[in-house]
Amino acid sequence: MSKGVSRKKALFVVNSLAGGGAERTCVYLANVMAQDADVDIVTLYEDASMPELAGVHIESLGLGRDVGKAAKLSQLFAARKKLDAFVSRREQEGRYDLVTAHLTASHVLTSFSRVAERCLYVHHSLPFAIHQLYPMPLLRYLRRIYRHGQSVSVSDGVRRQVVELFGADPSNVTTIYNAVPCEHIREKMHEDIPFEKEFLLCVGRLASSKRFDRMVRAFAEGGFDERFDLVFLGEGPLKGDLMNLAESLGVGASVYFPGYTENPYAWMNRSSAMIMTSDREALPTVLIEGLMAGTRVVSADCDFGPREILTGEFAAYLVQPDSIGDYIEAIKGALESYPSPSAELFRRYDADEVVRQYFARYEALVRADTEVE
């Protein structure tokens, strides 16, 4: 079969398929691409339960999660042979039309491999956080990867930090927003939920960076408990602290923690407003999902993602992250009136458009390498 009519081939290298937003993004993109392409996913770690992905080949390298930093780097270097062997087998009938690596460990592994110079290194989180997390020798190595490689960032704010903190050439870093499953959201948003009263909603891991304590304080100080309950969808280490805070502020009976749910969209649709209070966010797709599901969204104006999502009329519902008074005012304003999102607002998160951008960016990378040769 000629190249012109053959199916495209795509490779994702990612730490695992269980966990946070980056993993969910890979699963969703792979599902979309698999409709018209042959898709391989290589995971570094073995997951207890792998998602069912029709038409997607998943290969695990079986690396150990719970090892020290030095051992982790050594096993990544050793694993390059497994990755190279897999790529060699899968490319016997033609090279990949797209190679992407997601998250830091996968970036390091891929940089050791045969696809190092023809890979897009995708940045899902803020490089500032990575700078705080990793030791200087690894940061120097990451700087080398990103200065010489081609990167994709999930927001313009992330792109700026990749350039500023890692010294990447701005022309080598492209912003491609995460795809959001619009049709799936619309299918699920009208399902029933086990909750009767009107409520305000927060969605996310109950962890310090989400600063949900701000929402508990705004809920209490704003007197919202007179009409609404407050619901936190998610699990995390700070659940007990948030419960204790709610009790101490006299609103404990109105604050609920249903935990993790497979369908947050129905909760979003039923909520009177959804609020995000984070200290930092790369691209909080939960805001896009909330707007798609038909709720009114209020968000901290933290670095960087929210202000790239809530633009135009919606910018009025961005607030100073640490101002409880601003949250109260913005929530009350949103409950009173809120603009209707247009189709244009969601266009850049459309899956087909995102897939098109990835293949186009990779084609440009390969073409540039060919011209250099």
Image: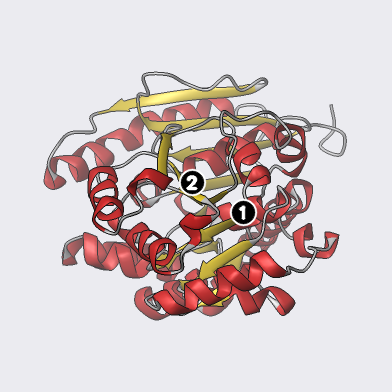
The x, y position of residue 28, in whole percent, is 62, 37
Q: Amino acid at mark 1?
A: Asn
Q: Badge 1 local density, few (<14 within 10 Å), some, or many (20+)? A: many
Gap in Å between the C-alphas at discs 2 and 1?
A: 10 Å
The x, y position of residue 307, in whole percent, is 58, 74
Q: Is residue 294 visible?
A: yes
Quadrant assignment, res 81: top left
How many circles with numbers are drawn on the protein? 2
Q: Secondary structure at mark 2?
A: helix
- Give the mark nearest the N terminus, 2 or 1: 2
Mark 2 vs 1: CB contact within 8 A:
yes
Quadrant assignment, res 34: top right
Of the pair 271 and 361, the residue shown nearer to us: 271
Q: Amino acid at mark 2?
A: Gly
Residue at the disc numbered 1:
178
Residue at the disc numbered 2:
21
Would residue 311 appear left or right of 81 to someone viewing this image? right
The x, y position of residue 296, in whole percent, is 66, 60
